[in-house]
Structures are given as C-alpha cells and as structure tokens.
Image (spheres, rainbow, N blue to C red):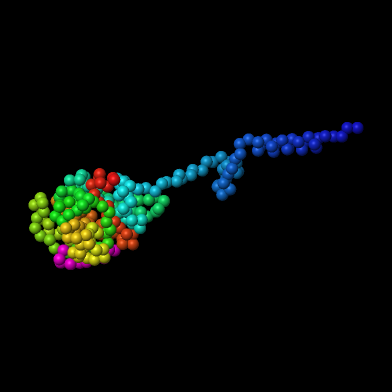
Amino acid sequence: MSVPRRPYVLLVALFLLVIGCSAGAVHTFDPSAPRGAAGPTASATQSRSVEPLRSPTDIPGLGPLTRARIPATARQAVVVTGEGPDSPRSTVVLHRFDDPALGWRPGEGPWPAHNGMRGWTDHHLADDLRSPVGVFGLTDAGGRLPDPGTLLPYDEQPRFSVTGEGFLGEPLEGSFDHVVAINYNRTPGTSPLDRTRPLGEERGGGIWIHVDHGGPTQGCVSLTEDRMRELLLTLDPEKHPVIVMGDAASLAR
C-alpha cells in the first residue's frame, strides 16, 4: 500500500520558492525610507546619494612658507595681493575660517587697493616707500572720525588728521579718518599712533590699512572709504584677524 506524498511535495515546493527569492543579488533597504505601493522591495532598489568628503581649502595663491606663518588661532585673514614686486596696486580679499572641515573660504572682496609707491620688500626700512611682505596681526584701530561700530579697540583722535598731497598730486585729507594698525614693528594693544618700534627706528613703522586717497602710499595699504568701514565692521578680535600681504610671487613661496 503506497503512502500519499502530496504534503511532502508541497513542502519541497515551498522550500524551493523561498530559496529562489534569496538566491539572487542581495538587496538592502532603509527601513526609515518611504515605502511605495510595491512595499519594501520598491525602496530597496532606490540608490542613496552620499556626499563625498571634502578636503579643507587653503587660501588661493599662498605657498607653504606663507601659509605656515598664519597662526593656528586665526579665523580671519585679510589677503593683500600686489600686482607685482614694484607695483603700487593690489587687490584685497577677506577670507574666513569658520568650519575646519571646509577650511578657508573667501568672504568680502575682491577690493582694489594701493600699497607702497615702489611696491614690496622682505626687509622694510624707513622711507623706502615699499610695503613689508609678511603675515601680521590686526589688533587695534582708530581714526579722526568716530568709531563706526568695530569690535576692535578704537582710538578716536584729532591727531589722525593729515594734509598735503600724495605722489600723484592727490589730496591726502581724510586718509586717516579710519585706520587699522598692521602689527609690523609695533606693540600690539596700543593706539595706532603709538611710536614704539621694537625692531628699531631704522626698520620703519606706522604701517596701517587706511582710507585710499587715490594714489600710492608710503608703505601702507589703502582701501576706499566704504570698504574701509566694511572692513572695520567685519574684523573680530575673538577671531584673531591677520593680514597676509605681499606681491603675488612672494605670497606664493
């Protein structure tokens, strides 16, 4: 007498059906993703885009030696790039470091600017009419006009008045309405008018960012009045701002 085998055949068929569904490519799905009318299988075939990791960005145009001079604490950098080693014209861009994952990012600028009449130098001397190349702190401000609202210490003094003519015959009046002292051969934390020269008088001093008078400077960097006010309102001592200045070739070292 033979025993009916239908239940056994049915179990085998169900087993093979299960194996057949899982024997192909393995599919995964996000259980939190929305499910369509087809159920979980529909979301399993959806590809998920992944944002690639981005390397921190360095300030364009700066070589390894210049980058190494920027303090690790700096979060704002006023980059002044001269057109040439003997040119009095330059461009200013303010860079920010707000997110270590992104690195330095350009902010305000580019702004046209003037620098020393004879261009740039690695060894600034008094009256050489060149701007010093390097990275310097920006800690103190002042001017003939009232503080426009800067976070930097601001010294309002009538002694910031200036008269006479520049190298191109342009009037100098108003050039020191607002200034930011560049910490070259000076004592940080003092008025821009302070005449202490740690490197000696022969190395010059009084190097500022000030209001542009329409011509070359004796060694300072100058911006138009509206850009000067914007810079003053942007600089934040808690972000340890610096100025990175020089002709393009020098900055690229």
Question: Residue at point 55% right, 47% down?
Answer: 33
The span shown in magenta is 149-160
Question: Observer-nearest residue: 118 or 14?
Answer: 118
Q: Seen in the image, is 77 located left or right of residue 12?
A: left
Question: Residue at point 27% right, 62% down?
Answer: 139
Quadrant hosting residue 137? bottom left
Asked if residue 177 is among those painted magenta in the image, a careful observer would answer: no
Quadrant hosting residue 72? bottom left
Q: Is residue 63 something that shows in the picture?
A: yes
Q: Seen in the image, is 231 located left or right of residue 116?
A: right
Q: Residue furthest top?
A: 1
Percent of width and height locating residue 157 = 17, 67
Percent of width and height locating residue 50 = 48, 44
Question: Observer-nearest residue: 11 or 143?
Answer: 143
Q: Quadrant of the C terminus?
A: top left
Q: Is residue 150 something that shows in the picture?
A: no
Q: Seen in the image, is 89 located left or right of residue 40?
A: left
Q: Quadrant of the N terminus?
A: top right
Question: Residue at point 15% right, 66% down?
Answer: 158
Question: Observer-nearest residue: 252 or 199?
Answer: 199
- Tag count: 0
Q: Residue furthest right?
A: 1
Asked if residue 153 is among those painted magenta in the image, a careful observer would answer: yes
Using the image, determine if residue 50 lies above or below residue 135: above
Percent of width and height locating residue 91 = 23, 48
Percent of width and height locating residue 213 = 15, 54
Q: Seen in the image, is 224 located left or right of residue 75?
A: left
